[in-house]
Image: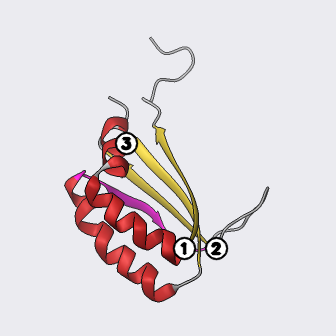
Amino acid sequence: MAKGYWIARVDVTDPETYARYVAANGPVFARYGARFLVRGGRFEAVEGAARARNVVLEFPSYQAALECYRSPEYAAAMALRREAGVAEILVIEGHDGAQPGDG
């Protein structure tokens, strides 16, 4: 089964409220088996527009990634995030590893 991912691009406008969002989302992400692959860090926008913060979360499955985003627990955290900045978030299914010519 392919994993699921959140890809988020964020501009934080209220760091204090964003810190509250980060504290609130931790237990929710843990409940759905998420782990951070990217959490801020250096980047270079080599094409297109960028936001100041980039995050990639990995979930055990695409379904788990969607369920987390749509959960009442995350809705409470999301309200904080929306007060704290502007974001684009994609929930995307990972690649199963097969390559052209396999099998």
Quarter of the figure with the N terminus: top left
Q: Is mark 3 on a helix, strand or loop?
A: helix
Specify whether residue 39 is painted magenta.
Answer: yes
Residues at marks 1 and 3, CA–CA distance in whole angstroms: 25 Å
Q: Name the residue under label 3.
A: 66
Of helix, strand and loop, which one carries label 2? loop
Graded by Cα atoms within 10 Å as few (under 14), some (14 to 19) or many (20 or more), the crowding at tag 2 reads few
Q: Nearer the viewer, residue 47 or 91?
A: 91
Q: Residues within 10 Å of mark 3 (few under 14, many from 20)?
A: some
Q: Which residue is drawn at 45% across and 79% down?
A: 18
Give the magenta part as a residue range: 32-42
Position in image of residue 6 (x %, y %) = 46, 51
Mark 1 lies on residue: 41
The picture places residue 94, in percent across and down from the top left corner, at 45, 37
Indicate left or right for 70 with 53 as reference.
Answer: left
Q: Nearer the viewer, mark 2 or mark 3?
A: 3
Label located before the other in sequence (2 or 3): 2
Q: Which residue is drawn at 41% across and 73% down?
A: 80
Q: Per the image, is 54 magenta?
A: no
Q: Is residue 70 above or below residue 47?
A: above
Give, as a three-letter code, the residue at label 2: Ala
Lower sequence index among marks 1 and 2 = 1
In terms of sequence position, does the residue under pointer 1 or pointer 3 come before the other? Answer: 1
Q: In this view, does 57 lie above or below 12?
A: above
Please report the residue visible at 41 percent of the width from the left and 64 percent of the height from the top: 78
Q: Is mark 1 on a helix, strand or loop?
A: loop
